[in-house]
Amino acid sequence: MGIVLKYVVFVAAVSSESRGVVTDETIQSAFRLTEEGFTARVSELWNTRPQVATTGTCCLVGVIYQQTLFVANLGDSRVVLGKKVGNTGGIAAIQLSTEHNANLEAVRHELKELHPHDPQIVVLKHGVWRVKGIIQVSRSIGDVYMKHAQFNREPINPKFRLPEPMHMPILSANPSILSHPIHPNDSFLIFASDGLWEHLNNDQAVEIVHRSPRAGSAKKLIKAALQEAARKREMRYSDLRSIDKKVRRHFHDDITVIVLFLNHDLITRGTVQNPPLSIRSALNH
């Protein structure tokens, strides 16, 4: 995606008194305004920093409003719910987001329906399906070189330029939105970029959080994913960690993780905790 700027955002709670009503439409509007703002910035920088047109980001957003969780997604990040299984002490993993990656058959089918006259809308390169043979995701914020013809030309890097005219946007900034009524057995949410899900499946990730202390649970997920990445490369975890971060992209994708434990008392009351959010970073990974 050019310079990948993936991010995962969670708004802990929204009340009608302080933030206004939350609907699918208000979330779509926020995404649209973000996309319009980025596109305007690309236009401003076109003469001095044209390569900004080739940068983009996946975007995963969660909002709790009136005991309902809204999840909106662009790209291939993912949110998974850890749900208690009755009184058994067990935990179930429930995926709450739709991904937009050309490696998924449903996404390829969607692209072909949207572009019926373009036989090259998805291309298999080195065992990976890519949109126009360039990018894996079909939706994003940014990547305007695949949305507006005026940015798909010199002086951007030739590898991003399409050989044929662009008659309509190739990529979309329209998010998939899911609403989930929060249940008392809903325990926690894992928001993570695809770097985590390349190495851990939903059940594995939920089980790691379930059996670990809350503090540092996101860090445990990152470590487990890196250990699996090292195993696949037939190398030691310590050796993977010692590789310069600029080179490690060849061994594993970037990984961003947030684990949110649901406080049902606060959700029921519709209040926002003060401070509303606590964020700890594990950049040493």
Image: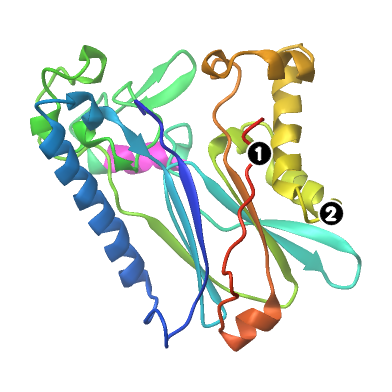
Going 25% across and 50% down the picture, which residue do you hit? 35
Q: Vertical placement of 90 versus 284: above or below? A: below
Residue 265 appears left or right of 113 = right
Residue 280 appears left or right of 61 = right
* Residue 43 in view (yes/no): yes
Is residue 282 magenta-colored? no
Q: Vertical placement of 82 versus 67: above or below? A: above
Query: Where residue 122 sits in the image (x, y, percent)?
Result: 33, 27
Distance, label 1 to label 2, CA atoms, is 16 Å
**Helix, strand or loop under label 2:** loop
Q: Nearer the viewer, residue 105 or 66?
A: 66
Report which residue position mark 1 lands on: 282
Q: Which quarter of the figure is the C terminus placed in?
A: top right
Q: Nearer the viewer, residue 93 or 67?
A: 67
Which amino acid is tagged 2?
Pro
Residue 212 appears left or right of 131 = right
Is residue 110 magenta-colored? yes
Residue 111 appears left or right of 216 = left
Which amino acid is tagged 1?
Ala
Query: Where residue 160 sits in the image (x, y, percent)?
Result: 24, 20
**Helix, strand or loop under label 1:** loop
Q: Nearer the viewer, residue 281 or 78?
A: 281
Q: State which region is magenta.
A: 106-113
Query: Where residue 267 sits in the image (x, y, percent)?
Result: 62, 80
Report which residue position mark 2 lands on: 213
